[in-house]
Image: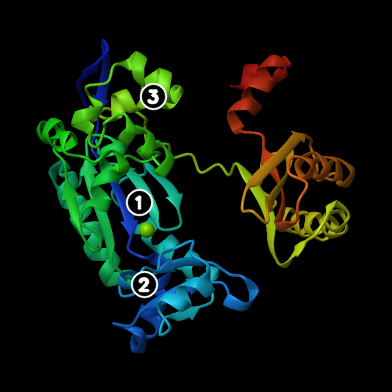
């Protein structure tokens, strides 16, 4: 193994790996510009229709100086940037590009963990390519994605997932940032806490009130202090601010859930309107499940709501099928938490994980033991 164990915090040692995090630059928008060169240099976004209360899923770098960003309502983005070109989402096209990009990465390591269509971790610790240089592999992946897929992808290379993810974002777009093990201590000291994945505006504001701006400040906080203020995430912050993270790249391709959700063009005013809408969703979910025969067994059913104040809630229960009566009960439970008009309604299932499946086999004393 080319891995070495060096990092230490609280008497715990951490494995150092060679991890690359690759993240396409404004993926959907880049694909659209690639396919229509007349859009090059213009502010372009991909997302829902303004009249139907759509939101942007992506916008390109030309749109950002106007204050436009992803997850912004399309209508608001168009007010900020009237010349913004908003294109509809074309998932089949993005999925195709995503598969091509993953196949390029898989040429260098099969330890691939996709986070979304345009983003993945790659463990290169034991890759034989380029004499084991993760930096050169990442550079080659970037060149190939540009040449073969026609878009730019940024990459970060570091001894763990946390730092690789921070690094890929460091010189976006079209950048490569490498953090070597001997640079970690210096790098994290100047790292603003809001760059730590998982630190959102609320946590960042709370840290600010504690006088914490960057990881050097955070390192002054004791484990007890951080756990007290942030619960379990506090213990994680204690490690992250020292550049320590030992989560492995998990290459299991297992799908964990499948859901169908609709953002309504007009709010559903009350519970009975939601109830009337629910069968259309469960029907669609059943059809999608039927098309995908390879799923693991269904384990749970859930109903998801977003109210007209943008708060969201999910209710779930054990179930081995898409059961309409259970879905109605879940809807009731979820709706009563706020009892107000609903703008998004969703229903989905969670699948039993393969590991659970195997534990079950052993627990039930199935005769399969002898064959394993
Ligand atoms: Mg991206």
Question: Which residue: 31% across, 42% down?
Answer: 194
Give how far apart the Cα atoms at labels 1 and 2 are: 22 Å
The picture quadrant where one finds residue 20 is: top left
Judged from the image, the secondary structure of the residue bearing numbered disc 3 is helix
Q: Nearer the viewer, residue 168 or 365?
A: 168
Question: Which residue: 36% across, 41% down?
Answer: 197
Disc with the residue nearer the chain's start (1 vs 2): 2
Q: Nearer the viewer, residue 310 or 299?
A: 310
Q: Residues within 10 Å of mark 1 (few under 14, many from 20)?
A: some
Above or below, 19 relative to 82: above
Judged from the image, the secondary structure of the residue bearing numbered disc 1 is helix
Give how far apart the Cα atoms at labels 1 and 3 are: 35 Å
Q: Position of residue 64 (x, y in %)?
A: 33, 69
Q: Nearer the viewer, mark 1 or mark 3?
A: 3
The picture quadrant where one finds residue 369 is: top right
Q: Position of residue 108 (x, y in %)?
A: 28, 49
Q: Nearer the viewer, mark 3 or mark 2?
A: 3
Q: Determine which residue is flagged by label 1.
A: 106
- For residue 331, side relative to residue 129 (left or right): right
The picture quadrant where one finds residue 133 is: top left
Q: Position of residue 349 (x, y in %)?
A: 71, 44
Above or below, 122 relative to 75: above
Image quarter (top left, top right, bottom left or bottom right) of the C terminus: top right
Question: Which residue: 76% across, 51% down?
Answer: 340
Give how far apart the Cα atoms at labels 3 and 2 are: 37 Å
Question: Can the viewer see residue 326?
Answer: yes
Ligand 1 positioned in quadrant: bottom left
Q: Determine which residue is flagged by label 2.
A: 30
């Amino acid at each position: 193994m080319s891995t070495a164990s060096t990092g230490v915090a609280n008497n715990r040692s951490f494995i150092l790996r060679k991890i690359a995090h690759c993240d396409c630059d404004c993926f959907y928008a880049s694909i659209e510009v690639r396919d229509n060169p007349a859009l090059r240099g213009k502010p372009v976004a991909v997302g829902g229709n303004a009249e139907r209360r759509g939101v942007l899923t992506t916008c390109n770098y030309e749109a950002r100086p106007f204050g436009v960003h992803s997850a912004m309502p399309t209508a608001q983005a168009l007010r900020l940037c009237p010349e913004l070109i908003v294109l509809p989402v074309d998932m089949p096209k993005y999925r195709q590009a995503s598969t091509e990009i993953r196949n390029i990465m898989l040429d260098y390591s099969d330890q691939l963990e996709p986070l979304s269509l345009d983003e993945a971790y790659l463990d290169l610790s034991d890759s034989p390519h380029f004499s084991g240089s993760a930096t050169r592999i990442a550079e080659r992946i970037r060149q190939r994605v540009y040449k073969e897929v026609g878009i730019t992808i940024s990459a970060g290379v570091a001894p763990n997932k946390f730092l690789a993810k921070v690094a890929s974002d460091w010189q976006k777009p079209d950048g490569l940032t490498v953090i070597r093990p001997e640079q970690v201590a210096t790098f994290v000291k100047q790292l603003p806490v809001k760059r730590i994945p998982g630190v959102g505006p609320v946590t960042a504001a709370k840290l600010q009130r504690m006088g914490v701006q960057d990881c050097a400040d955070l390192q002054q906080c004791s484990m007890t202090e951080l756990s007290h203020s942030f619960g379990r995430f506090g213990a994680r912050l204690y490690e992250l601010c020292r550049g320590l993270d030992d989560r492995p790249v998990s290459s299991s391709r297992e799908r964990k859930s499948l859901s169908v959700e609709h953002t309504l063009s007009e709010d559903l005013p009350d519970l009975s309107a939601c109830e009337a809408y629910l069968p259309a969703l469960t029907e669609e979910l059943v059809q999608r499940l039927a098309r995908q025969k390879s799923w693991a067994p269904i384990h749970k059913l859930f109903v998801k709501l977003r109210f007209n104040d943008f708060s969201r809630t999910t209710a779930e229960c054990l179930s081995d099928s898409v059961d309409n009566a259970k879905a109605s009960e879940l809807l009731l439970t979820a709706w009563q938490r706020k009892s107000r008009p609903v703008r998004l309604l969703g229903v989905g299932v969670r699948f039993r994980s393969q590991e659970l499946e195997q534990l079950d086999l052993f627990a039930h004393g199935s005769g399969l033991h002898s064959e394993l």
